[in-house]
Image: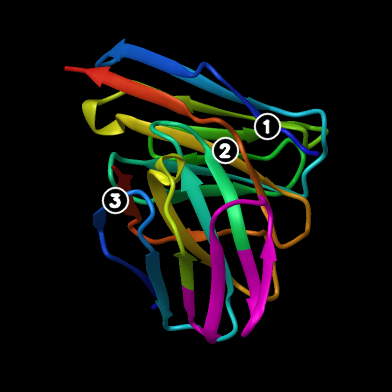
Amino acid sequence: TQLLEQSPQFLSIQEGENLTVYCNSSSVFSSLQWYRQEPGEGPVLLVTVVTGGEVKKLKRLTFQFGDARKDSSLHITAAQPGDTGLYLCAGNNAGNMLTFGGGTRLMVKP
Amino acid sequence: SQTIHQWPATLVQPVGSPLSLECTVEGTSNPNLYWYRQAAGRGLQLLFYSVGIGQISSEVPQNLSASRPQDRQFILSSKKLLLSDSGFYLCAWSYLSLDEGEQFFGPGTRLTVL
């Protein structure tokens, strides 16, 4: 069974601070996705990383896939209240299914 | 563009009553379809997935069942709800020929069993 561990589970920071969320596994994934979910809504895909060592940027968000494709990180620079939400990582092993992490709940206070 | 719909958005049902949640996808053909359940503020638990009409795979033995009567329709059902069935139910689709495995989610149904 493939598992994805996300840390931290909860994060409360002030507007303008930086943060990093981690997603770790002992399994290798062919790709990994990051989603953001707001209360009462479905998750929205932010990015997919495919190549080991790959770095993708989405405005103030930087996503990195580990060299061995077992882990990933999401770094947010100068967080804003609009970044508040549940961040989920999900790994794909070239099958029909994704393995989801437990999620990181981020709250950015103004 | 593709869109995915779920209804109802919220549902309050008594214990022992039946359940039917519906999910439909527009703008694509032959999608993979998924049902997930999410506990409050946590990750997603895969319940069922389907790669085609009438083809259902169950990931977790439970009180629920799924059906796919049409290519872009996925239904989650129960004959008798339990308290433990309460949760946030999400439907998702992906392309049949997976590139990077991305899934696209519906807005969800909040189910409360009393």
The residues colored magenta run B49-74
Per the rendering, the mark at residue A4 is: 1
Q: Amino acid at mark 2?
A: Cys
Corner quadrant of residue A15: top left
Assign the magenta stretch its main secondary structure. Answer: strand
Q: Is residue B53 magenta?
A: yes
**Residue sitting nearer the eye, A51 or B3:** B3
Q: Position of residue A73 (x, y in %)?
A: 59, 28
- Asked if disc 3 and disc 1 are in contact, CB closer than 8 Å, the reply is no
Q: Amino acid at mark 3?
A: Pro
Q: Amino acid at mark 1?
A: Leu
Label 2: few (<14), some or many (≥20) within 10 Å? many
Residue B103 visible, this orientation: yes
- The residue to which callout 3 is attached is B14
Q: Position of residue A29 (x, y in %)?
A: 77, 44
What chain letter is assigned to the residue under label 1?
Answer: A
Nearer to us: label 2 or label 3: 3
SS for callout 2: strand
Which residue is located at x 77 percent, y 60 percent?
Answer: A95
| Mark with earlier residue (2, 1) | 1
Asked if B55 appears above or below A72 in the picture, the reply is below
Residue A18 visible, this orientation: no
Q: Is residue A73 magenta?
A: no
**Residue sitting nearer the eye, A27 or B114:** B114
Which residue is located at x 45 percent, y 34 percent?
Answer: A87
- The residue to which callout 2 is attached is A89
- Asked if disc 2 and disc 1 are in contact, CB closer than 8 Å, the reply is yes
Asked if A48 appears above or below B65 in the picture, the reply is above
- Asked if disc 2 and disc 3 are in contact, CB closer than 8 Å, the reply is no
